[in-house]
Image (cartoon, grey):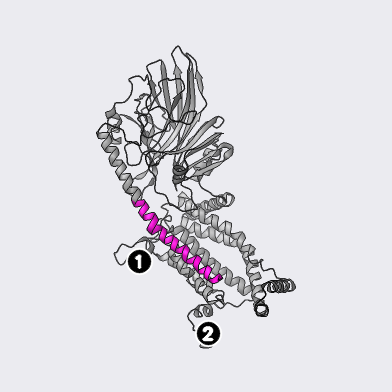
Amino acid sequence: MENKNLILVLILSFAFLFGWQMFIVGPQQEKEQAAFELEQQAQKLAELNGTTPANATAQSNGTSLPTANGSSLPSANTGAAPKTATAAEASLSLAEQKAQNLRVFIESARISGSIALIGGRVDDISLNDYREELDETSPDVTIFSPSGTEAPYYADFGWAAVNGVAVPTGKTRWTRTSGKTLTETTPVTLSWDNGAGITFNRVFTIDKDFLITIEQSVKNSSAAEIRMQPYSLISRHGTPTTTGIYILHEGLVGVMGEEGLQEIGYSDVADDGQQVFSETGGWLGFTDKYFATAIIPPQGEKYDARYLASGFNKDNYQTDYLLAERVIGAGGQASVVTNLFVGAKEDNVITAYRDVNGFEKFDLLIDWGIFYFITKPLFWLLNVMNGWLGNFGFSILAVTLVVKAIFYPLASKSYASMGKMKKLQPQIAELKLRFADDKTRLQQAQMELFKKEKVNPMAGCWPMLLQIPVFFALYKVLYIAIEMRQAPFFGWVQDLSAPDPTSVFNLFGLVPIDLPLFLMIGVWPILMGITQFVQMRLNPAPTDKIQAMVFGWMPVFFTFLLASFPVGMVIYWTWSNFLGIAQQAYIMKKNGVEISLWDNISALWSKKPKADAK
């Protein structure tokens, strides 16, 4: 029964992995793409007809503005002055807006893009240091895109009026009052007068990396007191394609004061509905595998925050926060500062924002996982090695070697214990024959034998178990670190974050045919399978034929399974197997255990005499 269960678990596991990709993920992505294209066509048709799509509000193109009670603002503000954009201006493409000077350009060391004068949003951001593809002609990675593009994604800021005051909306036409282009040394100021004695200003500054600071101010020149609450939000339209792997979170993310890290996937927020927080300190936004966005409120002020999904298909996602009410008397003014992160998840940059800028736990924007205390030091060591070796591929080999060396005493103890257990196997087999019908008595007899020979059957397991978190943490670091993205190794491996581009089924590129993903079995996955096979053969196969068959096929299963993984991870696994072979062979020899590698391998294909089948 145990053998049947083992085989069933393995078969179901691999069937699930391949079946999920072929019959669930593939069709689902095609369905989502078709729905998205239909939605875009409907939106373009609506724009041509001068109407608004069903999944967008008249005020803010799909943005749900926060208020104190968590509801949405009205679709239009009453009493607004005529200083708003025309429908024609609002529907212009990004290129047309730039050509007609309806945008403020952003030119910094690491960011390019623009700010819309219509709406005052930060909705056009590209990263100068990162390309979409490995090809040098590939365009830069785009993070933010304005409304009307294929996948709108932007940050918005403003004031929620408490007593009916006309405030800026997503269609407000702002005026640039200072600064021509936003650079690291040149801030830009936008202004808008509501025609009723109230002036709104937004001052944008940018640092040398990925941080944009927005200072909003309101000047009340009217004769009456006004009340309003400042807010900030990030809106993302359409569900992005994610890796879908359990070791990495992609979706809505934030640190909410004392509640700590709050992660929720796109489908979860769509299914479970709005999530509300009321905290002090932290940040919130969206995270992809290598890139992220976040709005950071004043760290000493209490705020109300939300995660939500809206729209007809529940695929307009938003993170936002609302600060406390400001009471601005006649002749008075109020201001508030918001920080916006838009960029790559580089550890040194993000950690500096935590330490220098005081953004609470901002380093958790990178998904270091539950083994944070292990993954961070391993990442540091990987970076140190890369500084010495100048190649992340060789750094992976070096770090794996260091980890193996650190755990050598535990591995030695484990193999020594296993050697003692192996010497007791004849006596254990005799006990099994003697007490074949009495499991309780068999267990008692085995424990007496272990006590007599001073052998702990678990002594060989605990050292191995202690290594699991470390190797898992290293595995995670190699998967999430942006330093692996488009980093070359040598030869055909030019991107450690992508799967091995070769395949045995097209003779490693000699036959010009396109293969499905599950047949892309490259050189490194094959080397990994070979090293795993050899490592397993250092010990005799299980005496049970079914278990021996299952373990014999396991390297083949893992070869196919890891073929689609980033090649940097496969290199790590292969090198770890190779070091494990050398380490185990040395320890076995040191402890006087015979190494019968070739005998164990040949035993797989040898046929037992017929008498064995009696």
| Residue 557 vertical placement versus 599 (above, below) | above
Q: Quadrant of residue 405?
A: bottom right
Q: Which residue is mark 1?
A: 508
Q: Which residues are magenta?
A: 1-30
Q: Whole-percent x and y of residue 267?
A: 44, 46
State the image quarter where residue 559 is shown.
bottom left
Q: Is residue 347 above or below residue 183?
A: below
Using the rendered image of the protein, determine whether residue 56 is visible from the camera's viewpoint: yes
Looking at the rendered structure, the kind of residue marked 2 is: Ala
Neighbourhood count class around disc 1 (C-alpha, 10 Å): few under 14, some 14–19, many 20 upward: some
Comparing labels 1 and 2, the label whose residue is closer to the camera:
2
Residue 230: x and y in percent read 47, 27
**Residue placed farthest to the right in the image?**
452
The picture places residue 176, in percent across and down from the top left corner, at: 36, 24
Picture residue at 35% right of the left edge, 41% below the top: 151
Nearest the camera: 201 or 30?
30
Q: Is residue 137 left or right of residue 162?
A: left
Number of marks in the rendered image? 2
- Residue furthest to the front in view is 437
Q: Tell me what residue is drawn at x 62 percent, y 65 percent.
A: 411
Q: Please, is residue 178 above or below residue 147 in the view?
A: above
- Residue located beneath label 2 in the image: 613
In this orientation, which residue lies closer to the viewer: 29 or 103?
29
